[in-house]
Image (cartoon, rainbow, N blue to C red):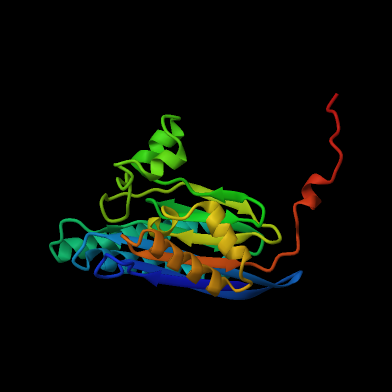
């Protein structure tokens, strides 16, 4: 398993308010050793170091959950959603004790169990599965413009230039209760996992991301190239990302090679 990560403040912001977490474990199974990983990215908001603190609190909550994910038989999403709830309450508590009116963070968390990628997502940071040939899957943003996209009012390309593109509908640290959709995707050979904030995915198309991945065999080099390119194109926001290239042998042909049979 090859993993690379980066977080930079960009060309405009005074500080980097993003936080990232990478945890890996090699676990014994009936088929041998299975490599698992927990990847978490949080994009803080609030200014005056409040966003930085919120993202760190969120990541720390998932650090504790990571140990449980590698060893427990408890359902994966129960652990991830409990960690999300704990992160939300910890941010609210910190804000209350320090008399801070607004501090929050987006969060995208992905746990790869050796076969499936299990994801939760709040805000407009994203988790992708990218392949050499095409984008495979990605999370859905909790944003005003994404509501317009899902309703068919505007396209995704138009959403990137919409004047209200930075309006997020849901983040950690703003409400007492927090929820998240859950995503469970099967991974195949040559698939890559990418977590990134809007500072990366707004200036870079998915095909630009895939080009960066295919041009280097190293996950660290690829993710650095993506971050520096995003900074060159825009650079008005913090830029953070985690790229993971699992070692998988199973390809799509195993699932599509059987001849279709009529049900009648």
Image location of residue 8, percent across then percent down: 37, 70
- Side (left or right) of 29 relative to 69: right
Residue 6 image position (x, y, % from top left): 44, 71
Q: Which corner quadrant holds the N terminus?
A: bottom right
Tell me what residue is drawn at x 40 percent, y 59 percent: 233
> Can residue 73 be seen in this snapshot?
no
| Residue beneath the point at 15% across and 56% down | 101
* Residue 42 percent coordinates (x, y): 38, 62
Residue pictured at 31% horizontal, 48% vertical = 166
- Quadrant the C terminus occupies: top right
Name the residue nearer the viewer: 67 or 46.
46
Q: Residue at x 35, y 50 (%)?
A: 178
Q: Reply above or below: 259 against 106.
A: above
Hey, which residue is sitting farthest top in the picture? 264
User: Which one is in front, 86 or 153?
Assistant: 153
Q: What is the quadrant of residue 260 in the picture?
A: top right
Q: Nearer the viewer, residue 132 or 56?
A: 132
Image quadrant of residue 57? bottom left
Q: Please count the marks in the image.
A: 0
Asked whether the viewer can see residue 171, the reply is yes
Relative to 219, is 133 on the left or the right?
right
């Amino acid at each position: 398993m090859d993993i690379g990560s980066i977080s930079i403040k960009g060309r405009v912001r005074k500080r980097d308010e993003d936080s990232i977490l990478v945890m890996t474990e090699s676990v014994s199974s009936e088929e041998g050793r299975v490599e698992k990983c927990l990847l978490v990215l949080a994009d803080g908001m609030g200014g005056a170091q409040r966003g930085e603190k919120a993202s760190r609190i969120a990541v720390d909550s998932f650090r504790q959950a990571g140990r449980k994910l590698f060893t427990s038989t408890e359902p994966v999403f129960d652990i991830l959603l409990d960690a999300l709830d704990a992160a939300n309450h910890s941010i609210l508590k910190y804000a209350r004790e320090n008399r801070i009116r607004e501090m929050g963070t987006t969060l995208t968390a992905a746990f790869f169990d050796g076969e499936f990628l299990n994801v939760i997502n709040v805000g407009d940071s994203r988790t992708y599965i990218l392949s050499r040939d095409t984008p495979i899957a990605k999370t859905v943003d909790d944003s005003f413009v994404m509501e317009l996209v899902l309703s068919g009012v505007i396209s995704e390309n138009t959403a990137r230039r919409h004047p209200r593109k930075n309006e997020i509908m849901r983040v950690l640290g703003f409400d007492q209760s927090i929820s998240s959709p859950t995503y469970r995707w099967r991974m195949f050979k040559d698939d890559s996992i990418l977590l990134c904030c809007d500072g990366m995915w707004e200036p870079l198309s998915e095909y630009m991301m895939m080009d960066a991945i295919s041009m280097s065999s190293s996950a660290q080099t690829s993710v650095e190239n993506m971050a520096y390119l995003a900074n060159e194109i825009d650079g008005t926001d913090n830029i953070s990302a985690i790229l993971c290239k699992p070692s998988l042998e199973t390809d799509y042909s195993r699932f599509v090679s059987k001849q279709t049979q009529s049900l009648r």
